[in-house]
Image (spheres, rainbow, N blue to C red):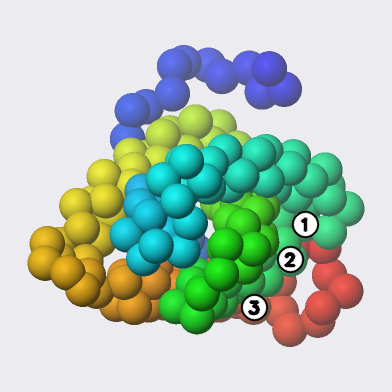
Amino acid sequence: MRIILPKARELTDWSAFTDWGWVMFTIGTFLGNAGVAVMFFYISFYPENQKTTDTEMAFYMVPFFNAASCLGRVLPNALADKTGPFNLIVPGSCVFGTLALCMIAIETEASLIVLAVLTGFFSGVYIALPPICFVALTEDKTKIGSRLGMGYGIVAFGFLASGPGGGNLLGKVDPLNWKGLWIFSGVLCCVSSLMYAGIRLGKYGPKLNVKA
C-alpha cells in the first residue's frame, strides 16, 4: 500500500455526499450502467424476436459483445495514464449511447453483428474507468476505499433495476416496444456522458489538452 493508514477505513464517508463531483459522478455512472445493462439483457433476444437472425446466431450476439468488451476494458485503462480518465469516459459513454440509439435502425444480420461488437467495445468504459475517476475525485486519498465502495454500492442498483425496468418498457405483447427500449438505453448513456462532461469542465476547465 502506498498509504499506511493509522486505522481501518470507515465503512461510510458521509462527507462524500457534500462533494458535488463525487455525487454527480455516482449518479452519472448509475444512469450509464442502467443503460449498458439493457444491452446485456436484450441484445440476444432482440434479433430472435425481430427475425433478424435465427436462434443459433442470436445466441452468439452475447459472445460477440463480451469479446469486444474485453478490449474495451483494457485499452481505456492503458490510455488513461496519458490522457486522464475523464477525457476517455466522456466521449466513450456518448458513443455507446449513440450506438444504442442506432439499434432502432437494425434490419440485417451483418449490421447487428457490427453493432454488437461496437457497443461491446464502448461498454468497457463503464467497467474500466469509473474506479480511476473515483480516485481522481477523492482529494483525501485515505478515503478512497470508502468512497469507492459507497459509489459502487449505489451504482449497482442501476444494473439491478435496468433488466426488469427495460422488460416492463418492452412489454409482453407483440409487437414489443423495441424502439422505446433502445431510446431508454441510449438516452441514459448520453445523459451520463453530459454529467461526466460537466464534472470534467468544472474540475479541469475547458482546455482539451489537459490531462483530466
Q: Residues within 10 Å of mark 1 (few under 14, many from 20)?
A: some
Residue found at x 72% / y 22%:
2
**22 relative to 197, above or below:** above
Q: In the rendered structure, which amino acid carries the disc numbered 1? A: Gly
Foreground residue among 185 and 149: 185
- C-alpha separation, residue under disc 2 versus residue under disc 3: 10 Å
**200 relative to 166, above or below:** below
Earlier-in-chain disc, 2 versus 3 = 2
| Residue at which label 2 appears | 87
Q: How many numbered badges does the structure rendering display?
A: 3
Residue found at x 11% / y 67%:
173
Q: Secondary structure at mark 1?
A: loop
Pair 2/3: label in front: 2
Q: Position of residue 141 (x, y in %)?
A: 60, 37
Earlier-in-chain disc, 3 versus 1 = 1
- C-alpha separation, residue under disc 1 versus residue under disc 2: 6 Å
Is any part of residue 171 visible from this angle?
Answer: yes
Foreground residue among 148 and 4: 148
| Residue at which label 3 appears | 201
Residue 62 lies left or right of residue 182; in this view the side is right
Foreground residue among 193 and 198: 193
